[in-house]
């Protein structure tokens, strides 16, 4: 089930979208302000965001820019009034994927959502470019990593694991899921390979591998990335 985050300060619009998207079998999360929406997006890493431009506090353009700077690549569809042309351009320049003019037709919006989610399928995902957590900086384009000023030697497989964790930041990821999505193994294959790679990543990236801060174990379920 795809997770969609709606960031919209008009409660009647927000409620209407929530009802209709839930009826389409999406898992819907909502926020009434830019600051709240940014926090939600970082926490749940949704599959798509509907983002109003004019929001109290942090506006939609700033939310979009902050998410892209943090390395989040989920599709973002801006909700905008016809008079917000400059903001629409800014939103697209900051990394938004599309925009819909208010008042919008529900059928058009649903079609745009479906199109963006199709492009987000595993075979169509764009690779993350850069990501930073703590003192660790990852460059996915050049496959380089550093901890502060010190280079860290990561294998391509370890970059793949970290990318999967980052895309599912804050969510529990099972060993079977990692095998299926990163290795392409049958889910019933041994999970020992995953544990070995996680152990190596902790040794390379955690200041105290025995008490990890970023790649944490969830008993009986798998791992969770909180960087």
Image (tube, helix red, strand yellow):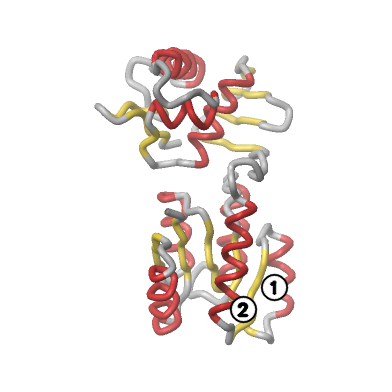
Mark 2 secondary-structure assignment: strand
Residue found at x 58% / y 63%: 114
Depth order, front residue of 135/164: 164
Reply above or below: 44 against 146: below
Query: Which quadrant would the C terminus be assigned to in this image?
Result: top left
Reply above or below: 138 against 156: below
**Between disc 1 and disc 2, whose residue precedes?**
2
Locate residue 17 relative to residue 129 in the image: left or right. left
Measuring from the top left, give residue 210's x and y in whole percent: 34, 15
Residue 194 quadrant: top left
Mark 1 secondary-structure assignment: helix
Measuring from the top left, give residue 174's x and y in whole percent: 37, 31
Measuring from the top left, give residue 71's x and y in whole percent: 60, 44
Return the residue at label 1. Answer: 88
Q: CA distance from mark 1 to mark 2?
A: 7 Å
Return the residue at label 2. Answer: 80
Measuring from the top left, give residue 15's x and y in whole percent: 38, 78
């Amino acid at each position: 089930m795809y997770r969609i985050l709606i960031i919209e300060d008009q409660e009647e619009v927000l409620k209407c979208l929530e009802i209709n998207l839930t009826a389409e079998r999406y898992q819907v999360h909502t926020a009434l302000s830019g600051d709240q929406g940014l926090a939600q997006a970082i926490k749940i890493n949704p599959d798509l965001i509907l983002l109003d431009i004019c929001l109290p506090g942090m506006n939609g353009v700033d939310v979009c820019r902050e998410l892209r700077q943090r390395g989040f690549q989920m599709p973002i569809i801006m909700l905008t009034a016809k008079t917000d042309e400059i903001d629409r351009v800014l939103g697209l320049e900051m990394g938004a994927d599309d925009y819909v003019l208010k008042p919008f037709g529900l059928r058009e919006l649903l079609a745009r959502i479906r199109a963006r989610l199709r492009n987000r399928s595993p075979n169509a995902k764009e690779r993350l470019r850069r990501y930073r957590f703590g003192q660790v900086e990852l460059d996915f384009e050049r496959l380089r990593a550093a901890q502060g000023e010190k280079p860290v030697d990561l294998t391509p497989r370890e970059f793949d694991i970290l990318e999967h964790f980052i895309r599912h930041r804050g969510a529990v990821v099972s060993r079977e899921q990692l095998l299926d999505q990163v290795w392409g193994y049958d889910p019933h294959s041994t999970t020992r390979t995953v544990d070995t790679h996680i152990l190596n990543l902790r040794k390379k990236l955690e200041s105290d591998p025995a008490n990890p801060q970023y790649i944490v174990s969830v008993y009986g379920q798998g791992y969770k990335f909180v960087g």
